[in-house]
Image (spheres, helix red, strand yellow):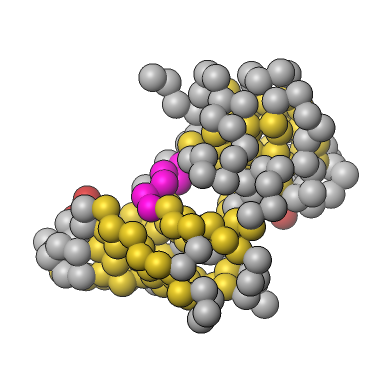
Amino acid sequence: QKEVEQDPGPLSVPEGAIVSLNCTYSNSAFQYFMWYRQYSRKGPELLMYTYSSGNKEDGRFTAQVDKSSKYISLFIRDSQPSDSATYLCAMSEATGGGNKLTFGTGTQLKVEL
Amino acid sequence: GAGVSQSPSNKVTEKGKDVELRCDPISGHTALYWYRQRLGQGLEFLIYFQGNSAPDKSGLPSDRFSAERTGESVSTLTIQRTQQEDSAVYLCASSLTSGMVETQYFGPGTRLLVL
């Protein structure tokens, strides 16, 4: 079993839809949770970062962490064609000495006009 | 300012040959990470450098893989006697420090194909 599970998609939605992306994980030591966006043939870029459980909102993006269920989500409101990309969840332990990230496989999202 | 750069952007090699991949981090970033992204899989951590400390090599998949970094500048990842399963995108990231809250900035990656 992988430490982080993520549905690879592809997920296709109409413009303006609310998108829900999710990851589950098995390592209870994970404390830091991130969502990265990766456009084709580009490196990942950080979208959202959350420490421990709770919600965080940034514009059209909301990240949720439920540590009791080992489940994290990213919601995108009013989705736009420019949101079409692969979304990767990533996590790390609070052990210090470096921030090694464990990634999900990524979910490919397409927002259609 | 300039982001993380990597070279070459693409590399095709024959099985058994050695390859060297280069990463130029953002100036002033003390931490540097290498990850591998195989088709259909998530990024896998390979190695991490922080300043002049000994690198964390815990993610290197075999002794054919090695990496160096000179001070807080350029890093090279070397794969000896390449195998077909080494085909992947190799991504480098740098961050200001190695702290948990520091954003890792990724380069565009080197796409390696081993024939």
Majority secondary structure of the magenta segment?
strand
Q: Quadrant of the rendered structure where residue B10 is?
A: top right
Q: Residue at x 50, y 63 (%)?
A: A52
Q: Residue at (71%, 18%) from the top-left corner?
A: B71
The residue lying toward the viewer, choosing from A76 and B50, is B50
Closer to the camera in the image, A46 or A51: A51
Residue A95 rendering spot, x and y as whole percentages: 69, 52
Judge from the rendering whether residue A76 lies leftward or rightward of residue B27; answer left or right.
left
- Regarding residue A106, the answer to whether it shows in the image is yes
* Location of residue A104 in the rendering, given as x and y in whole percent from the top left corner: 53, 64
Tell me if residue A46 is in the magenta stretch. yes
Is B60 covered by the magenta stretch?
no
Left or right placement of residue B110 versus residue B83 in this view: left
**Vertical position of residue A49 compared to residue A106: above or below:** above
Left or right placement of residue B111 versus residue B59 in this view: left
Residues shaded magenta = A43-48
Q: Where residue B13 appears, x then y in whole percent?
A: 69, 37
**Left or right: B9 as drawn, with respect to B67:** left
Q: Nearer the viewer, residue A88 or B40?
A: A88
Q: Nearer the viewer, residue B59 or B115?
A: B59
Q: Is residue B11 visible?
A: no
